[in-house]
Amino acid sequence: MHESIGTLEEYMREIDVHQYQRINLNTYTSQIDQLNNLQNLLEHVFGTPKVPLQNSLAEPQVVWNNADKSLVADFESSTWDVVSNLQEILKFEEISVGLHHLLVAHNDCALQTLQLIRRYNLAPPGLNQQIQDYLRSRHGLAWFIDATSNSFVQGSKFQGDHSWAPYSEIQLKHNFRLSHFNNVFQEYPVPKEFIDEEYTTERMKQDKTWNDWVLFTRKLRNFLSKELEGDNQEGSSRRFLMDVRDDLVAMAKVCIDPQNAWINHNSMQGDDCFILGFLRFLHHRLGLKYMISEIFGGEVGINQVEFEQKFSLYNLAYDIEIWKDMLLDYSYYTSITSAQGPKVKNISTKTEKEVMKNVYWKNLRDKFIEYKKENARNFDSDKDWKKKLRNNLFYKNLLELLDTQASHLGELYHKIKSM
């Protein structure tokens, strides 16, 4: 923890104070002071930690039972200050690109400290549960969504062309920039998806089709809110999917023949990709994959085999895009932090860097292998597979993109190894 705060303090000393509003800098300074205060209280109560930590601490609850009430109150107040600061730092009207890396470093320090307290049960009785109840609430979830999104800003120090805000569970679990957020994410019963009300309301006025999709997302959000609060009963996912069957049929038709989707800068874009993203979520997280025949079987306008083939192709392309971005982002990060010397301590050794880089590389390579095998299987088993792809511009361009990227995979490997 001390090392993380030390890095944050060093970042602060490097800032040219004349470039930024004093109120923003004062906020960061105050938050660093409060982080130090909480860590000082931890050492005052439990002593200087040794390694392994769990063997060096007195029994926490025994300590708190014998502690002065004023010390308990100070510790609880200091802990809630750190929790509050995680929310407060997002209230700046605009987070300056030049200060953005301070926000990232602060959030890492704060979450690391809170997670250490939770892991070793170092809080006074009841405090850990109160914090967890907040994080699992709707307000806590809204904070989580904003905080993870705001962790990525193009042009920020240590972030490059492939530093993208998370839009996938894969990123929340595996992006090296979100390791502490992932620990929070694991506490949620199911992943949550919110939509931008102001944007979607305006689109609803302009587009009847978009109106239908927004109404569906509200149904989904209401269902997930009940999941979050523990109000749904056993079998609720199945009932929900059957209730929205008409929406799912419309989504399947979009998947088979997307008209508002395209490839731009090697990325899948367009409103239909947004719809396919919801279909992916329902497929993987709510069990749609076990109900394909029941929901789509015999439905006019849906060839179930074609749907599953194209949906699988989209999923592989989706995973490839994410793993490639994370690989390139991580390679860029390690290359610039290495060049800046030992001040950056997030990942300290060359061996550690290569291990993490190989994790990203292996997942990307495996997805391309899976793509090649599945595509070959489709061409062998379905004489019309090529025609199905060529008849839709999105799939035609997507296939060409994946084939091109697969053929240059060796070049990508040498590129990231040299970084």
Image (cartoon, rainbow, N blue to C red):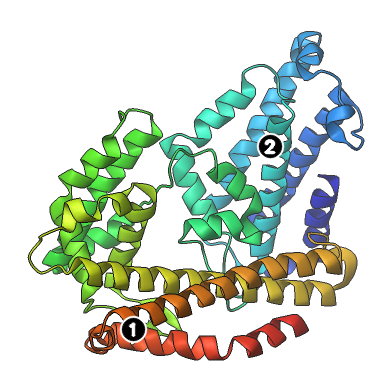
Q: Is 121 displayed left or right of 83 in the figure?
A: right
Q: Is residue 197 visible?
A: yes
As drawn, which residue projects farthest toward the top?
66
Question: Residue 29: where, in percent of width, then height?
Answer: 74, 49
Q: Which mark is residue 379?
A: 1
Between 182 and 205, the residue placed more toward the observer is 182
Query: How many tags in the picture?
Result: 2
- Looking at the image, which residue is at 47% across and 80% down? 372
Q: Amino acid at mark 1?
A: Phe
Between 316 and 68, the residue placed more toward the observer is 316
Between 201 and 274, the residue placed more toward the observer is 274
Q: Quadrant of residue 9?
A: bottom right
- Looking at the image, which residue is at 88% across and 36% down? 52
What SS does tag 2 mark? helix
Marks 2/1 in contact by CB < 8 Å: the verdict is: no
Question: Residue 282: where, in percent of width, then height?
Answer: 32, 53
Q: Amino acid at mark 2?
A: Leu
What SS does tag 1 mark? helix
Q: Which mark is residue 114?
A: 2
Mark 2 crowd level (few <14, some 14–19, many ≥20, 10 Å Cα): many
Quadrant of the snapshot with the C terminus: bottom right
Compared to residue 382, the image places residue 235 above or below, namely above
Compared to residue 236, the image places residue 3 above or below, namely below
Label 2, label 1: how many angstroms apart (C-alpha)? 52 Å
Q: Quadrant of residue 114?
A: top right
Question: Residue 136: where, in percent of width, then height?
Answer: 48, 35
Q: Is 3 displayed left or right of 394 in the figure?
A: right
Between 289 and 396, the residue placed more toward the observer is 289
Compared to residue 150, the image places residue 45 above or below, namely above
- Looking at the image, which residue is at 43% across and 47% down? 191
